[in-house]
Each structure stands twice: as C-alpha cells, then as structure tokens.
Amino acid sequence: MADKDLASIQEARDLTRKARSAQRDFSRLDQEQIDQVVQAIAKVMTAMAEDLAKLAVEETGYGNWEDKKQKNLLASEKLYERIGPLKTIGVIEEDRENKIDKIAIPAGIVAGLIPSTNPTSTTIYKTLISLKAGNGIVFSPHPTATSCIGKTVDIIHQVLKELHISEDLVSVTTMPTLDGTAELMQQADLILATGGPAMVKAAYSSGTPALGVGPGNVPVFIEKSADIQASVRRVMSGKTFDYGTVCSSEQALITEESIAQEVKKALVAEGCYFLEGTAAEKVKGLMTGPRGSMNPAIVGQPASKLAQMAGIDIPSGTRLLVYEEQGVGPGYPFSYEKLTSLLGFYTVADWRAADELCTQLLQNGGLGHSMSIHSNNKDIIRHFGLNQPVSRLLVNTPSSLGAVGVTTNLDPSLTLGCGPVGGSSTSDNVGVQHLFNIRYVAHGLDSASPSQVDSSSVDIEAISHLVFEQLKKMNYVPSNVN
C-alpha cells in the first residue's frame, strides 16, 4: 500500500471523527434553526451557481457552464423550494386517531461520493438534504474534480462560520483514493453514492447502509400519435443538455415506420447529423475505451469536438451525431449509454415492437432507471407505465430534465434510484426523506373495540363452508372441522 493510500485512509478517519462531533451539536438544534442554516447555504449557492459551473467545466472538461449553472440552480434554489417547508427534526407527525407519533432521528454522518460529470451540483444537493435532516457529511470527490468540489465546500464553510456552526459538519477529502473512499464508507453511517456502476457496487458491498443508483441507458419512444415537431425539440433539449452528461439523458430514439422519415427530417432540421459509412465506423471506434467500457475522452463533448476526435467532417451547427443502429448488445455500440452528443436511432413496425425494444435497451445497462415516451395515446402510455422496467416514465418531456425534476413535479434530485431491478435500495428520486430514521411512538389501544373490521359485505361463514368443502374433495379435513 502506497503512502498516499495510508494518508487518505487516515484523513477519512479524521474527517469522519470531526464531523461526528460537529453533528452531535448540530442535531440538538430545532427545526427553525436548522432551516435557517439550509436556507442560508441555498441562497449563497444560488448566487454562486454560475461561478461554480464555470469552475466545473474548466477542471473536468465535461459539458458547458450554461447548463451546469442550471444544474446548480436545481440543486440549490429549486431543491430548497421543495424541502424548505418539510418537517425533518423532532416530532414530525402526531396521529391522534391511531395514537402514533413519528419522531425524525438523523442518520448521523453521510459519506457523499461525487461524480465528475455533475460535481458542484451534486455537492450542493447532498449538502442541503443532509443538513436538512440533521446530519453531517464528508465528501469523497472524483479525482478529476477535486478543485471545483473543494471550492464548493469552502463556500459552504463560510456560511457555516457566519452562522457559528462548526465547519467540520461538512468536509471533503483532499487526496481521494480507492482505499480512502472505502475507509470513509466504513466510518460513515450512511452512503450517498452517485457515479459509475463499480463505485455504486462498492458502496453496497461496504457493509454500511447505502443509497446508490445504476446506469441510465434511457430509451425514448416517439409514437405515431405524438406531435412530431414538438417531440423532437424535447428530445434535442434533453439530449444536448450539458452535452449529455446527465444520467437520465436520452440514449436511443425509437420510432415507428409510418412516421420515421418525418422524425428523421425533424431531427436534421434541429441539428442532427446521421452517420453513415466510414464516418460511422470512425465514430464507433472512438466510443469504446481500452477496457471495453465507454471512452472517458468522449464524455460531455459537443458534436464538433467528437467529429474532430474521430477525424470526420460534419455540417456547421451540428448538435448531435446520430446513427441508425441495427441491434442491441455487444457489437452495437450505439445501444449502450453514451454520456455525450451521440444518439442511437431505431425504426420499428409499431408500438408493440417499440415496447419490446425499449425493454431490451434497458436490459442492456439501464434497468430500473428511466425512459421517456412522446405520445397522445393514453392507453399506450399506460401500457408502457405498467410494463417497462423503470422507476420513472417521462411523458412528453425531455427525459434528462424531467427525471431530475426540472420539467416535471418529481422531487429535485441528482441521485435517481433504480429500485431492486436496477440494484438500488429505492426507486425514488433520493431526497431528504431518505436521510433520517423515523422513531414510532405507539400508544396502546386498550379502550378500542376488539374488532374494527366491517364484515357486513362479506359472508365469512359461507366462504368458510365452501373452502372446507373443497378441502374434503382433496381428502384433507382439519381435525376440528365437522
């Protein structure tokens, strides 16, 4: 083990110990006092949204600052609007009828694992929901985003200092290593993991309770009843947002034969360039990294940069590179998640074939996450909602923005649960409600009637008789039944 690894392990222990001491004092504050802290941080982060966005792009090279600013605003301003009024400290509910009180108990110390694709926004978001629930948090930053994440925490420290709250309540490791992150996860009480599959798997394997998410290979279906022009505009706004770095961004567009040409025409009008021949092969060769996974060099890049890297010529003003993929799985690179300005395109016979293909795409690395559908047929929308293995079905809205709560009323979140089918412990948009325990204070019902069940509509005797008659035919009769 190298010296840096040893030092990072010790740092994780030190930061967690200091955070735990600070959190004990912080958890003694009442709801109003904690809300003041959260509001102050949200207000400052809202004002700093643009500056932090620029820092993130400058350091990581992913995305564009204009869209990252919107992510920062989602994680500060819009998130606070949603969680500000919530009760998260002390007695949060008194149910007089059922004689049960609910008391919120902080989880303790949260280990916040931060990705390079959304570094500042995820740091802001995890800070606000952790503190709102009375917790402390220690961040483990992605190695390529330590500076912008560190700057975000520095600003939070200034707010805490002005409010006479220990700065140790929120901290960040300065020498991220695998061993240091593993130690942090061991020392914490709860893990909030946002990042790649390997990191999320490590969080769930740590022995510490964890909230993590899986990859988002999001299919989008444009059904023939949809407003095609409006649907294509929504797809473009979603997929091009921050150059495709949001895990809920559209990855493959599926449409029906009867409208395929109209959809393609609309895509070209919106700045799509369909790859063919040698150009397609060059881009495919660029997509896969040395270990067979997505090439990190293409993440969060504009179409013009991807074309330059691949050595191909594309029209000026091209926003997305699109390829008509023919299958799903190995050998079909456009059927996988692409966190950049690349989009797969599929044509199918009808909506039933689209239903089957969307499931195949989700099984190819996106189970439990999200998909979107553009349609005006309520029956088809309901069918997809009942049958697709996702936690979020976004209807007539950009999937990247709708899933995180920008263009829908879903909870604003940058950690999107995928449920058990996707290897997650929740299918929710992870928020403050997941970061505290509920202690139930239940009073006895001695004075209550022994039976509160209304059986007036059910003839229990008749049902029992029928059951016992069937049991006799099966040569099985309980000893206490005549």
Image: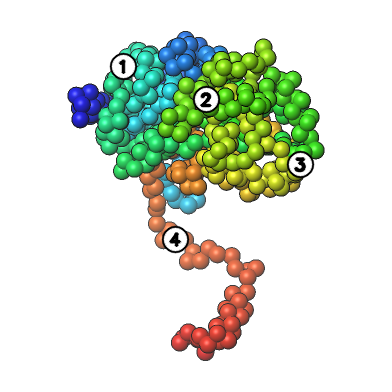
Q: Which mark is residue 377?
A: 3
Q: How far across and how far down the image is residue 396, in percent?
A: 69, 33
Mark 3 vs mark 2, CA separation in Å: 39 Å
Mark 1 vs mark 4, CA separation in Å: 49 Å
Q: Could you tell me which secondary element the residue under label 4 belongs to?
A: loop
Residue for badge 1: 164
**Dot 4, how many residues are within 10 Å of its Cα: few (below 14), some (14-19), or many (20+)?**
few
Asked whether 154 or 354 is in front, the reply is 354
Residue for badge 4: 447
Residue for badge 2: 286
Mark 2 vs mark 4, CA separation in Å: 73 Å
User: Up-down: is 229 above or below 212?
Assistant: above
Q: How far across and how far down the image is residue 440, in percent?
A: 39, 47
Q: Could you tell me which secondary element the residue under label 2 belongs to?
A: helix
Asked whether 166 or 245 is in front, the reply is 245
Say whether marks 1 and 2 touch (CB < 8 Å).
Answer: no
**Label 3 vs label 4, nearer the camera:** 3
Dot 3 or dot 4: first in sequence order is 3
Mark 3 vs mark 1, CA separation in Å: 56 Å
Dot 1 or dot 4: first in sequence order is 1
Say whether marks 2 and 4 touch (CB < 8 Å).
Answer: no
**Label 1 vs label 2, nearer the camera:** 2
Residue at point 49% right, 64% down?
A: 449
Q: Could you tell me which secondary element the residue under label 1 belongs to?
A: loop
Dot 3 or dot 2: first in sequence order is 2
Q: Quadrant where the N terminus lies?
A: top left
In which quadrant of the rendered view does residue 372 lie? top right
**Dot 3, how many residues are within 10 Å of its Cα: few (below 14), some (14-19), or many (20+)?**
few
